Structures are given as C-alpha cells and as structure tokens.
Amino acid sequence: MQQYKRLWKRVLASAKSIGKRPEALRTLLYLLVATSGLAPIFQNCQSLLVSSTSAKDSPQLANTPRSTPKSPGKNTSLTPSPASTPRPLPSLEVLLTLTDEETATLAAIADRRWDGRAWYLEKSAELTAYLPPDFLERREEISAQSGVYPKKEDYDRLKIAEYRKFIDTHPTVRRSIVGSSIALSVPDEFLGENDFNLGVPAYRLKDMVAQVDRLSDSHPPQEIAIFGAATPELLNQTHPKNILDDTLTLIETIHRKYPKTRIVFSSVLPRSKTEQLRDPRMADVSNPVVSVLNRALAQQFAGDDRVEFLDLSPYLIDEAGNLKREFSTDGLHPNVQATLVFLKLLDRS
C-alpha cells in the first residue's frame, strides 16, 4: 500500500508540468500499469498525450477540425503518424526502360502539348452517334469561335458519351483512370485495349463521386486508378480536411458500386517552383499542404485492404517538395514521361 501512495505522490507532483513534460507522466503511468493492472486507463491517457504532441508537431494543421470517421476504425485526422518503413522501389531508370514500340510511341507524342479544346473538338467529331442534338449545337458554337472554350459540363458529357461507346464494344474493363485534367493527360497510346480514361478537366473529388455513380453496373473494372485528384480543390483554396473527407467519400462510393474492384489512389501532385510555372495562378497550389495531404492519405489507407496508396514522390518530386520541371508541361500538369512513370508503377503494384 505504501508503494502505491508513493507512486501517486509522484504523479500529483508531475501534474503541474504535464503540458511541458508529458513524458514524465507517461513514465509514471507505465509504473502504475505494471503494479496495479490499470491498462485500459493508461491506454486512454496515452492516446491523449500522443494527440497533444502530434498537434504541436504539425502547426499548419493546428486549427484543423476533426470530423466523424466515414467507416469504422478509420482515422480521418490530418495529423500524420510516423512513416513506416518503405518497401523497395524500382529505380526511375528501370521504370523508363522502354520497349522499342514504347520508344517509338513516345517519340511520336513527346512534343505534344495537351490542348483541352482541341481534344474536345476532335473527340466529339468521333462520337456524333452518341451525342444528343443540343450537345452538337454547343459543339458548333465552340468550334466557330476560337476564343470559346468548353466548360467542365461540356467535357463531362463528352466523356460519358465516350464511355458508353467503349462499353458497347468492350465486354470487360481492365482499368479505369479517374481524375481531373491530370488524368486526361495520360495518352491513349499507352493504355491497354480494355483500359478507359475517365479524366475530366477541372473535376473535383465530388464530381468524381457523381461520375462513378453513373458508370455501368454490368461492367465492373478490375481496377480503378485515381490520378490527379485534389488539384482543382487546391487551386481554389479548399480546406485540406474537406479534401480528405471527399477522398474517403469517393473511395466508399467506388467500393459500394464495385465491391471487388481494386482501387489505387496515386499521391496528390504538387506544382513546380513558382518561377517555372507557365501561369502564375498555378502558385495557388500549396506544396506544403500537398505534402501533409499525402502523408495523411498514406496513413489513412495503410490498413485498408481495398485501397493501395501509390506514392509518386520518389520519382517526380524534388527534395524541396516541388514537381520536377522535366516531368511537367507547364509546371502543374504531368508530361508524357510522368504519366509513363504512373502507368509503369500501376503495373508493378
């Protein structure tokens, strides 16, 4: 009994300095656990102490509100945990060791600068049988005036029409790529016969949720790869906690619609250095926020058997957290080599 009294006196003596020295209280609690079997109480105290110190280590997220987890056992906090030991990764040289056919294809498209308006006009000309009259009228309006560009809704309707044609001629879908203009920049020439790119310019995560809901129930893809997510949100200064919540909603939507489909979420891409950006508005993407988001997403999906987090950072990002300019067309969007890295990693994952 005297032993317990002495321990409690030490606990009370340390209580005044908990905010400054949480390790002191943790050490004493370990002693109490060892002598009195108070393990459940200790675990709760330890969780509070860890949460407190983690918040101090992430000042940019100190005011981030917590939200209710979207699935049992999932932590949606943006406070990152210590990184786990990474598995061995193939080198960039290995990933970009191409076959003769791939080399020839790359040479043919390497200088291509992706133009959404040109893509829209070319693709819509191929899909007239799948497009309603009002869409074709809108297309003529855009085609007649060089200064008029398609809106997100125009791209969206066109992509759904392209998808309908695809499933009419393909009994199976191996891989679907979901995302924004970053996803759409993946060249069709490097996709497999049964792969389909669902990328739409300016698509936010909430748009992707609505798009997935419209896909065919009878054509479940073997894999859905999410590429270029969150960039439109970052350009519009969306709170990172909202981005994480919308990401989890997208994952749940895919899993609910296609329970057996493998999901791969590629890391959010940062931008290049400010002086390397083609458009100064691209500087609205905060690379420190991108880094925190990726760490939180990696933690979120670490224990989820349905989702693999594909980290592109070792290949496309420099030590300062910037997108390497040699892997971008404009400082924000990936070029052909970058999309090849993405596809090669998908095949190896």
Image (cartoon, rainbow, N blue to C red):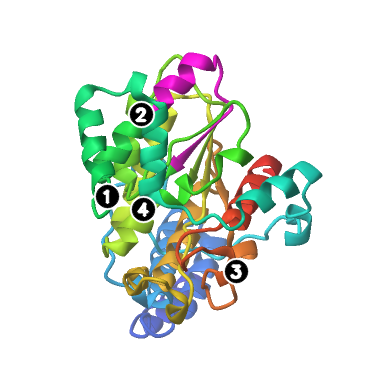
Could you tell me how far apart the alpha carbons at marks 1 and 4 are, in whole angstroms? Answer: 31 Å
Numbered range of the magenta stretch: 162-178
The type of residue carrying mark 1 is Tyr
Q: CA distance from mark 1 to mark 2?
A: 19 Å
Secondary element at image label 4: helix
Camera-nearest label, 2 or 4: 2
Question: Disc 1 or 4, which lies upstream in sequence?
Answer: 1
The residue where tag 1 is placed is 149
Q: Nearer the viewer, residue 94 or 169?
A: 169
Horizontally, residue 48 falls left or right of residue 323, namely left
Tag nearer the camera, 1 or 3:
1
| Numbered tag placed on residue 160 in the rendering | 2
Disc on the earlier residue, 1 or 2: 1
- Mark 3 sits on what residue? 326
Dot 2 amino acid type: Ile
- Residue closest to the far front: 144
Q: Do the residues bearing badges 3 and 2 touch, measured as CB atoms within 8 Å?
A: no
Circles 2 and 4: CB distance less than 8 Å? Answer: no
Compared with 107, 196 (above or below) is above
Which structural element holds mark 1? loop
Among the 4 quarters of the image, the one containing residue 64: bottom left
What residue is shown at x 77% (from left), y 49% (from top)? 98
Which amino acid, by three-letter code, is at mark 3?
Answer: Glu
Q: Earlier in the sequence, mark 3 or mark 4?
A: 4
Q: Earlier in the sequence, mark 3 or mark 2?
A: 2
Position above or below: 123 against 56: above
